[in-house]
Every structure is written in structure tokens, then in C-alpha cells.
């Protein structure tokens, strides 16, 4: 099968979104509508892109109207909904392209959405990459350095006292000799979880000493601040290695954000108040639709799949 021309897809998606926004505007003219019709009928791909945009808009509008009266959307917000439609279409395109489309070219190993990967390094240490992750190796005679460019990785380090093992991020470093630990980049913050042995971790600032973490401990830090060391269930935190995410009385918004990492597109919670509802469970990250169905049933929510790349979640009824 020939590979799709993503430059064409990008252009057509942008055109469809632009036409949608233009036709929603108060000053849209008959000439605008005629121009749109010519564009729409000129290519079957134009029609498909337009159907995607309107499906997202219709679903958003229906969700607003089905909400309790106090929370219904104002009809005057059509431009905002049009913008949401364009954003959702962009999300769909990004899902089609995958993270490798924008991956840092310095990467030695990467994973796409919903992909996990095991890598055996030259020193017999092992790395497991979680979804949407990338690393770059910087090996020398004096040290074993790995740059975590995005996402999350689990490291099982072969002891070598002469060559320290260092995981580098823009926020700081993690050093180990022989141990097992996970490092995750989450926005501007880095989280380190130790499952075995001892590591030293902390920001790059010279005036901030690294912390020593042992098995069952975790810490988060950014360039300027380190949070207190936590005692955690390290096996639950790294359950993604066995294809699961595990939560104990965690907010729904946090659970959905975790599931969102393992599927293309986006999961949108239409009522932010629902995001605080507690969730407990172990969910299969290889079948996020099954996980969403379980959450829908247990919490009494309504899950609407608008496209393969957009899921809307709202209160039932």
C-alpha cells in the first residue's frame, strides 16, 4: 500500500478547518458559500475532511444541549466551537502521523503512540520505552549517558563502578551504578521511581544537592525545585511494563490523562467537575476502549466516540 502524502493531508485539513471557521462567521457571504462548494466538490478528500470537521462540531453541540440547563453552551459561542473543531481535526491528523513525525532527530530509539519497546544496550543494561518516548545514547569510556528526550523509560542497569550510568533530562540527572528505576518527563517536571537498588537524582543547579532514593521511593523535580521524597507502590507506578495502568482512589481526570497517552487522538472530559470523581482499578493499556467502557459503567458516565481520534465524556443523561 502506498504511504499517504501527509503534506497533502495537512493542507486539506487546514483548508477544511478554514472553510468551517469562515462559514460560521457572521459576515459570511454568498460568494464564500459558493467558493466552499467548489472546493468541497473538487476532490473526494475535501469532502472527507469536511465531514470530519462537521461531525466534531455536531457532537460538541449535542453534548452542550444535553447538559443540564445551567451548564448549556451559549449559541453565541459558535466561533469557539469552530475553533474546537479545528483543534480536534488537528489532533486527528497528529494521530495519523504519529509521534515519529515530529521526533527529535537526535533519537537513537523511539516509540509511537500505544507502542512499547525493549532495548538491550552494549553494556548489557536494558531499557524499556513506554508509549511516545525517545532516548539518545552518549556512550564514552568514562560514563554511560542516556538523554531522555520525551516520555518515560525504565532502566535495568548493569553494574560498572568505573562507568557511572546517567539519565539526563533538561531538568536534571539520575545517576546509578547497578539498580532499576523509571524516569518520566511530564511537561517541565521529571519523576523518578526506584524499584531496586539506590539512585541519586535532582536538578542540574549546582547549589542543589542530589537526593538518594531507595527501592519503593520516588521524587519529582524541575530545574528550580525538588519535591519531597515519596514512599510509593513502585510496581503499580511501573505497571505499564506489563501492559497496565493501576490507580487507587485517583481523580478521574488523572486516569483519563493516563489512558489518553496510549491511544491516538484525544479523550475530552466535557464537565470538569467530573474530573474529581475517584477511580480505583487496573486498566489494560492495549485496549483503552475496554477501559473506557468499564469507567462508563462504574461511574455512570456517557462515552461518545466521535471519530477514531476523538472521545467525548460527559455525565449520563
Image (tube, helix red, strand yellow):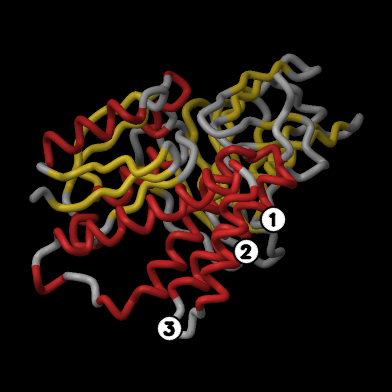
Between residue 147 and residue 145, name the one nearer to us. 147
Asked if the residues shown at circle 3 and circle 1 are in contact, with their CB atoms under 8 angstroms apart, the answer is no
Percent position of residue 134, x then y: 68, 37
Identify which residue is drawn at 68% across, 42% down: 148
Could you tell me how far apart the alpha carbons at marks 2 and 3 are, in whole angstroms?
47 Å
**Local SS, label 2:** loop
**Local SS, label 1:** loop
Query: Is the residue marked by circle 2 packed among few (<14), some (14-19), or many (20+) residues within 10 Å?
Result: some
Identify which residue is drawn at 14% across, 59% down: 66
Figure quadrant of residue 98: top right
Between residue 272 and residue 46, name the one nearer to us. 46
Residue at image mark 3: 26
Percent position of residue 317, x then y: 8, 50
| Mark with earlier residue (3, 1) | 3
Residue at image mark 1: 170
Percent position of residue 47, x then y: 53, 47
Residue at image mark 2: 223
Identify which residue is drawn at 48% across, 85% down: 27
Between residue 256 and residue 173, name the one nearer to us. 256
Query: Mark 3 against mark 1, which lies toward the viewer?
Result: 3
**Local SS, label 3:** loop
- Left or right placement of residue 209 versus residue 263 in this view: right
Could you tell me how far apart the alpha carbons at marks 3 and 1 are, in whole angstroms?
46 Å
- Left or right placement of residue 88 versus residue 188 in this view: left
Identify which residue is drawn at 31% across, 32% down: 246
Asked if the residues shown at circle 2 and circle 1 are in contact, with their CB atoms under 8 angstroms apart, the answer is yes
Amino acid at each position: 500500500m502506498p504511504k499517504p502524502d501527509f503534506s497533502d493531508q495537512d493542507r486539506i485539513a487546514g483548508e477544511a478547518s478554514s472553510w468551517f471557521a469562515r462559514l460560521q462567521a457572521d459576515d459570511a457571504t454568498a460568494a464564500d458559500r459558493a467558493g466552499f462548494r467548489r472546493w468541497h466538490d473538487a476532490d473526494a478528500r475535501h469532502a472527507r475532511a469536511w465531514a470530519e470537521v462537521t461531525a466534531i462540531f455536531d457532537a460538541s453541540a449535542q453534548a452542550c444541549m444535553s447538559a443540564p440547563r445551567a451548564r448549556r453552551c451559549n449559541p453565541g459561542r459558535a466561533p469557539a466551537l469552530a475553533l474546537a473543531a479545528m483543534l480536534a481535526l488537528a489532533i486527528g491528523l497528529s494521530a495519523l502521523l504519529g509521534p515519529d513525525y515530529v521526533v527529535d532527530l537526535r533519537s537513537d530509539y523511539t516509540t509511537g503512540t500505544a507502542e512499547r519497546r525493549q532495548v538491550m544496550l552494549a553494556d548489557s543494561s536494558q531499557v524499556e520505552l513506554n508509549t511516545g518516548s525517545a532516548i539518545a545514547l552518549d556512550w564514552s569510556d568514562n560514563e554511560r549517558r542516556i538523554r531522555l528526550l520525551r516520555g518515560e523509560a525504565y532502566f535495568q542497569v548493569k553494574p560498572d563502578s568505573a562507568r557511572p550510568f546517567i539519565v539526563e533530562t533538561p531538568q536534571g540527572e539520575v545517576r546509578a551504578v547497578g539498580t532499576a528505576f523509571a524516569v518520566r518527563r511530564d511537561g517541565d517536571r521529571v519523576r523518578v521511581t526506584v524499584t531496586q537498588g539506590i539512585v541519586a537524582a535532582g536538578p542540574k543547579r549546582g547549589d542543589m544537592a542530589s537526593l538518594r532514593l531507595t527501592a519503593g521511593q520516588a521524587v519529582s523535580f524541575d530545574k528550580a525545585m525538588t519535591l519531597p521524597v515519596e514512599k510509593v507502590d513502585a510496581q503499580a507506578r511501573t505497571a505499564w511494563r506489563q501492559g497496565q495502568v493501576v490507580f487507587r482512589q485517583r481523580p478521574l481526570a488523572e486516569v483519563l490523562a493516563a489512558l489518553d497517552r496510549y491511544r491516538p487522538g484525544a479523550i475530552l472530559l466535557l464537565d470538569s467537575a467530573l474530573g474529581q470523581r475517584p477511580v480505583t482499578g487496573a486498566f489494560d493499556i492495549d485496549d483503552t476502549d475496554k477501559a473506557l467502557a468499564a469507567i462508563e459503567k462504574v461511574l455512570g458516565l456517557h462515552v461518545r466516540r466521535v471519530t477514531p481520534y476523538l472521545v467525548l465524556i460527559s455525565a449520563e443523561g
